[in-house]
Image: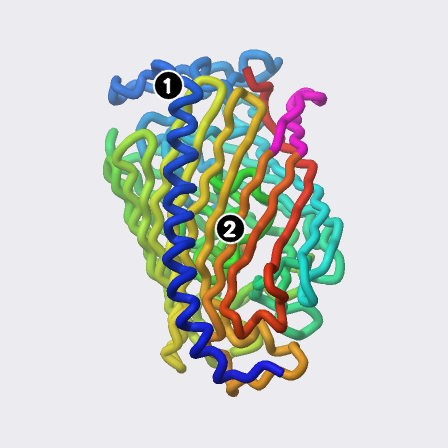
């Protein structure tokens, strides 16, 4: 039987492990970008010619020329304002200007119609008494239409997820993962599916001269200005089908109800403010949840160079958890993203910190992440993710023989280290198909060993499909 006071011993071990694993994460984010530079010399792009856009032909992922009816002059953004106007990711999030954007695009009349989508069919194995196995599919599909309007650009977007259908029993096994509910109870060692309606949004960008942009975003369900692009949409996590342990401290608000956002951009700097309903989506994933605008966030994004993006955001979430309705949360996140395209490849990296502070109890929970995805020799992917995340006592609320204090408090800090490889096959036109696998090793304080075993490990094998124009 494990007792609560054993935590102290775990705490001491925690510090030592943290030091080792922080070093590993540094290695991870240094080694992958350097590998990219060894593999290929960077191609000569037009990056030095400020104000000019770079032709699509220099970016393999953007080669529209082989598609009948496709726009032939689609541009990789050279400036932050152009990256914003692309609206290529969830909400109003941004990635470095040089980030590849796999998609299909059609240009009937005055409109630009775009289809983005990624789906994984996964076979999971999570070890130990708290683990499990499952076959399931994750992913999302985004339809977007854009056109020029007087003084600006108008965009509408719908993002859908198959997960309510393809994740049975309201969650899939993922060791140490927590957040949201299934059958009225907190999910422990599992990840919830995302809502069928991930985003329905209208965006209007008003051009204020050449260097400034005033942006409006309204979404019955959508993504307020908090954090970087959520893990499912980040290029640095593009081949990793598993959810981040820090999701509910970093980017879980990517599906929120009744979102309005305003943003002002000047050259490389943008300031945004959002209002939205703070309650997390309920476990009924097919419906559209609604609620009054009771929460807010603000975000500062800076994209000074082609390959860099950084953000800092601060949010007040009113009663986010159905299980803990009296607890309001202040969330703070900071992140830096780097992207480096080169001939026949790309490497994308994210460093991310997220922090929740529960206002009633004063409890603070932190989540740190470093991840990187390298595409090399056209069709090969190598990726890694390191996380260091606080877990709350809710994780063990269903564990037999555990004595926990009342209320939701700090339980432990755990580490997860994932490494994966995948190879892409071009069997079907406009569908990049990949076979891949990844392994995740977890570290936890010793007092959790009777519950999780000595070496908790996760294994994922997957088939991934992504809508995109042919590479190369
Ligand atoms: Cu999510």
Q: Earlier in the sequence, mark 1 or mark 2?
A: 1
Q: Main structural element of the magenta stretch: helix, strand or loop?
A: strand
Q: In x, y percent, where is residue 62?
A: 50, 21
Q: Quadrant of the N terminus?
A: bottom right
- Up the image or down, 300 lies above or below 330; here it is above
Q: Which residue is mark 1?
A: 42
Magenta stretch containing residue 19, yes or no?
A: no
Residue 204 in view here: no
Look at the numbered disc 1 and give the secondary structure of its residue.
loop
Residue 177 appears in which quarter of the rendering?
Answer: bottom right
Q: In x, y percent, where is residue 3?
A: 55, 84
How packed is label 2: few (under 14 Cα within 10 Å), some, or many (20 or more)? many
Q: Which residue is mark 2?
A: 417
Image point 42% across, 26% down: which residue? 36
Image point 68% across, 42% down: which residue? 461
Label 1 vs label 2: CA separation? 29 Å
Image depth: mark 1 or mark 2 in front: 2
């Amino acid at each position: 039987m494990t007792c609560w006071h054993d935590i102290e011993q775990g705490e001491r071990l925690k510090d030592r492990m943290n030091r080792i694993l922080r070093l590993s994460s540094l290695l991870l984010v240094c080694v992958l970008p350097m590998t990219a530079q060894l593999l290929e010399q960077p191609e000569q792009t037009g990056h030095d010619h400020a104000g000019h856009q770079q032709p699509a032909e220099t970016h393999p992922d953007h080669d529209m020329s082989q598609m009948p009816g496709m726009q032939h002059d689609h541009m990789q953004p050279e400036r932050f304002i152009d990256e914003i106007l692309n609206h290529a990711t969830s909400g109003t999030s941004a990635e470095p200007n040089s980030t590849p954007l796999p998609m299909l695009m059609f240009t009937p009349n005055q409109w630009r119609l775009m289809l983005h989508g990624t789906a994984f069919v996964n076979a999971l194995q999570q070890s130990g008494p708290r683990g499990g196995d499952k076959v399931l599919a994750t992913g999302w599909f985004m339809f977007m239409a854009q056109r020029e309007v007087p003084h600006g650009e108008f965009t509408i977007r719908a993002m859908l997820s198959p997960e309510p259908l393809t994740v049975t029993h309201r969650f899939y096994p993922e060791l140490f993962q927590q957040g949201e509910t299934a059958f009225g109870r907190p999910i422990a060692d599992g990840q919830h599916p995302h809502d069928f309606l991930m985003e329905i949004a209208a965006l209007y960008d008003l051009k204020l001269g050449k260097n400034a942009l005033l942006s409006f975003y309204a979404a019955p369900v959508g993504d307020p200005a908090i954090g970087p692009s959520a893990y499912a949409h980040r290029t640095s996590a593009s081949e990793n089908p598993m959810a981040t342990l820090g999701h509910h401290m970093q980017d879980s608000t990517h599906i929120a109800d009744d979102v309005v956002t305003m943003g002002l951009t000047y050259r490389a700097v943008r300031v945004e403010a959002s209002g939205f309903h703070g309650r997390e989506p309920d476990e009924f994933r097919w419906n559209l949840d609604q609620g009054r605008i009771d929460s807010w966030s603000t975000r500062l994004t800076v994209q000074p160079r082609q390959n860099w993006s950084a953000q800092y955001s601060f949010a007040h979430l009113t009663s986010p958890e159905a299980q803990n309705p009296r607890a309001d949360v202040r969330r703070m996140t900071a992140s830096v993203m780097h992207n480096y395209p080169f001939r026949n490849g790309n490497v994308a990296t994210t460093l991310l910190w997220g922090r929740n502070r529960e206002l009633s109890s004063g409890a603070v929970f932190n989540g740190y992440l470093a991840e990187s995805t390298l595409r090399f020799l056209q069709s090969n992917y190598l990726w890694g993710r390191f996380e260091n995340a606080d877990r709350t006592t809710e994780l063990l609320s269903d564990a037999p023989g555990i004595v926990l204090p009342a209320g939701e408090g700090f339980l432990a800090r755990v580490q997860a280290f994932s490494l994966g490889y995948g190879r892409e096959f071009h069997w079907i036109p406009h569908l990049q198909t990949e076979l891949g696998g990844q392994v995740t090793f977890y570290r936890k304080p010793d007092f959790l060993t009777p519950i999780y075993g000595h070496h908790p490990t996760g294994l994922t094998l997957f088939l991934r499909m992504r809508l995109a124009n042919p590479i190369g």
